Image (cartoon, coloured by chain):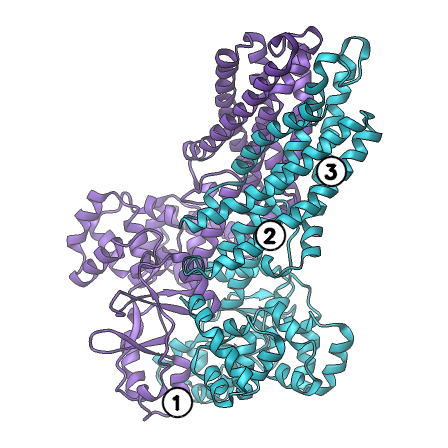
Chain colours: A cyan, B purple
Amino acid sequence: MTDAYSSLILPDVRLMVAEGDRHGMSEFCKVLHPAVVANILEELEPHEVWAILDHAELRLRVEIFEYIALRRQSEMVEKLDKRRLSELLEGMSADDRVDLLSRMPYDRVEDLLPLIAQAERNDIRRLLSYDEHSAGSIMTTEYASLPARITVSEALHQLRQQAPDSETIYYIYIVNSARRLEGLISLRELILAKPDAKLSELMQRDVIRMRVDEDREDVVQELARYNFIAMPIVDNNDCLVGIVTHDDAMDVVQEEATEDAYRQGGVEPLRDDYEDTPLPVILWKRGIWLLLLSIVALMTAGVAHHYEQATKPGGARAGEAPEGLTSALIFLFIPLVMASGGNAGSQSSTLFIRMFALQPTDAAVAGTGFRVDRELVLRELAVAACLGGALALLDFAVIQFWFNLGMDRSFVVSLTVFLIVILGTTAGTILPILLRRAGMDPAIMSNPLIAAIVDILGVVIFYEVALFLL
Amino acid sequence: MTDAYSSLILPDVRLMVAEGDRHGMSEFCKVLHPAVVANILEELEPHEVWAILDHAELRLRVEIFEYIALRRQSEMVEKLDKRRLSELLEGMSADDRVDLLSRMPYDRVEDLLPLIAQAERNDIRRLLSYDEHSAGSIMTTEYASLPARITVSEALHQLRQQAPDSETIYYIYIVNSARRLEGLISLRELILAKPDAKLSELMQRDVIRMRVDEDREDVVQELARYNFIAMPIVDNNDCLVGIVTHDDAMDVVQEEATEDAYRQGGVEPLRDDYEDTPLPVILWKRGIWLLLLSIVALMTAGVAHHYEQATKPGGARAGEAPEGLTSALIFLFIPLVMASGGNAGSQSSTLFIRMFALQPTDAAVAGTGFRVDRELVLRELAVAACLGGALALLDFAVIQFWFNLGMDRSFVVSLTVFLIVILGTTAGTILPILLRRAGMDPAIMSNPLIAAIVDILGVVIFYEVALFLL
């Protein structure tokens, strides 16, 4: 719904910027949900985005900015002047701010910190110090907390003061003067309670909590298990240092699922969404696995070669028996060809299936996905050509100099590998796209099935190339 | 933390039940968080669970019961008498109740419904009618709603009345007399507002909403994008019919990620957690894919066979050239052997990696995971023996009667397939367990790498079996 909407409104927004329509830009920021505005702004150039956001008041500007994807955020602040940037950072919530800062060059951060208020600066330094996969890295320090001794009506009064600086006020943590976590009361319980009741009588005492150095995945699992809106995070002295909220937990679940899916498909996890990742990074994250898997497949060929030499009468070298000329070569290297095609295909289908899983289906239905599809398919083919070429070179060198099978046969194998990588990638790309266009779940075509189909094609290509060239 | 805790407290709980310690059982239900109680109860037999829950008052009993895994819930109610069951169902929240009912036999549900209050009965019938993957299937009908014309203080008063029957009161939906969704106000905004302000002045009017027949995955993606606690669900007339809450959305994200991971690993999605799924179901969900993939691999062998016959001088049958005896056979069926071992291994590693991803790591560290590990490895080996045996029979039949290669060679291939399926499964099972015990992420060992390693072993086994038997 919203994606189709974005593409409809985009030309109008561009026009507003071009014409410098102050009123229009201000209204645009105000009327729509900040997440929808952010979604539309992601389609524009940084200078256009700032031209628009300058017409929103700071609070709203920050809110919209926080909904923009992290990678886009860091592009946007690259050329922003220090004063406007520090203003923005001060307004941001503690966790989003640290995520952005941790992506900025060290020098720039050190340059900026003096411009930020002391309290926030200390907060930033502490949050930046937590390990990337710890609870500390995903928590926010902006939570609502109250002492146990006050009454419900006093609590509601204090809460109204804390509300602007709290990520959530639906869970209120009860801490003593040393900030040790003593209890929890929900806003629901608070408004249902008698105004003169003491919090100490109402609060739950045995509060589920997690330590700041625990794995963020565990924090998220526990939050999900207890259906919490937020999980309190304590340090080693049981003092409250932050909370992990349900929305950040949801992001972590999605990120971890993506990481696991990538690993399962033989792709090193990417930091950003696949469609936002630059080509060289993709080549590296995929190439490193294809290379490793090719080396193992070459070892498989080596093992078969060894058995052949040991068992053949007269110790004939593989591929030398006249009538076995083609088949002996194919025999040794068919596992290599299949692994190359299958793995390249698995990588593509994994990337596309996961990308689609994180997108609403209506993007495809509304037709806004078509242009993107064509660009992505072309990029996949470029990736396939590079990776296929690299693997072909490796295979050629190994077969020529290690297996010692001669130029012509080495060339046959490399050419086959190159072609099957292109073909595997095409299959792994096109099948999920077609399934999605047909309104089906792209994931129903499992990677092993794509690999199995590519296997048959591998045999055909290998024979055809060998028969043609040898 | 909590898992280790559960295993410590379990013997005491069993003792309480055996001794009929009423006070102890009642305290046990009261003192701990309902999710922790549920977690411990899952280790007990249904009659023990009821013995304990009978000592908790109905409200608490329902709350604890709702935290028990769905599969376990349906086991538990199997022998429960109608009166106690209907009491339980009446108390449950609308969405959890329907999930449970949809797992019960049709006759039993029809038998029960007359015992349930009219309003709830209609609600159940409506919720049961939604498609399994629609927004309707995951929404609850228990939300807080108010008219636009009342003041903040009136709203807070009415909200206190609605609170016990609402899943969340943090988002309050503003509806007109026809229940059309007109606005949204959060409890946070409500308590910050002046008591005599009208809701119509305060509410957000452009409320993001989704339709009841939209895909549940899309609903969850949108909820995550807007960082909502709940997403309102409307019918075709834009009337509010339910809400999807953040905790149910989280469950859907995890379920969908598991489904996709399974498909990627060539396993048909399971309804329950892997460790709770009975053996015959696992055999079927894995077997169906292994069978399909084996048929494709046999087709690959068929293609190679065809080329061999077409290109060999004199059209000699594969495996007939004296010095090619072993290698020709191996050549034709190495793709089959590799596919069988690699796919069986991928299935095991996929199931184990996903199972571990959904468990807290401390279960392994605290040692409670060890017994479970041994049981699961033994079950995997039983699965491998069954699946390997079935594939071996299929391969034997096809090679014997379609390729016509003779009993001895058909047997060599089948035996190799059987052994490599066992070996692949073992590798796919043991590697994730070892990585987890070592405190590493089990997912870093990608499926393609496990498959590649199994490939080498496949070649070795194939040669050794062939040399030994032929």
User: Which circle marks residue A378 in the picture?
Assistant: 2
Residue A135 image offset from top left, x and y in percent: 61, 65
Label 2 residue SS: helix
Q: Residue furthest front?
A: A468
Q: Give the structural element (helix, strand or loop) at label 1.
A: loop
Q: Name the residue located 69 percent from the left edge and 6 percent from the top edge.
A: B322
Looking at the rendering, in which quadrant would you find the C terminus of chain A?
top right
Q: Who's the residue at 57% across and 69% down the image?
A: A69
Residue B129 percent coordinates (x, y): 25, 53
Question: Observer-nearest residue: B53 or A253?
Answer: A253
Pointer 2 and pointer 3 on the same chain: yes
In the image, B402: left or right of A394?
left
As rendered, which of A268 and B99 lies closer to the eye?
A: A268
For badge 2, the amino acid type reads Leu
Q: Nearer the viewer, mark 2 or mark 3?
A: 2
How packed mark 2 is, by other alpha carbons closer than 10 Å (few <14, some 14-19, many 20 or more), is few
Q: Which residue is mark 3?
A: A392
Q: Quadrant of residue B211?
A: bottom left
Residue visible at 74% across and 36% down in the picture: A295
Q: Chain of mark 2?
A: A
**Residue B441 seen from this side:** no
**Residue A427 located left or right of residue A294:** left
**Mark 3 element type:** helix
Marked residue chain, label 1: B
Q: Please name the amino acid that badge 3 sits on.
A: Ala
- Estimate how packed mark 3 is, as few (under 14), some (14 to 19) or many (20 or more) residues with alpha carbons within 10 Å: many
> Residue under circle 1?
B193
Name the quadrant containing residue A108.
bottom right
Query: Between residues B443 and A34, which one lies in front from this camera angle?
Result: A34
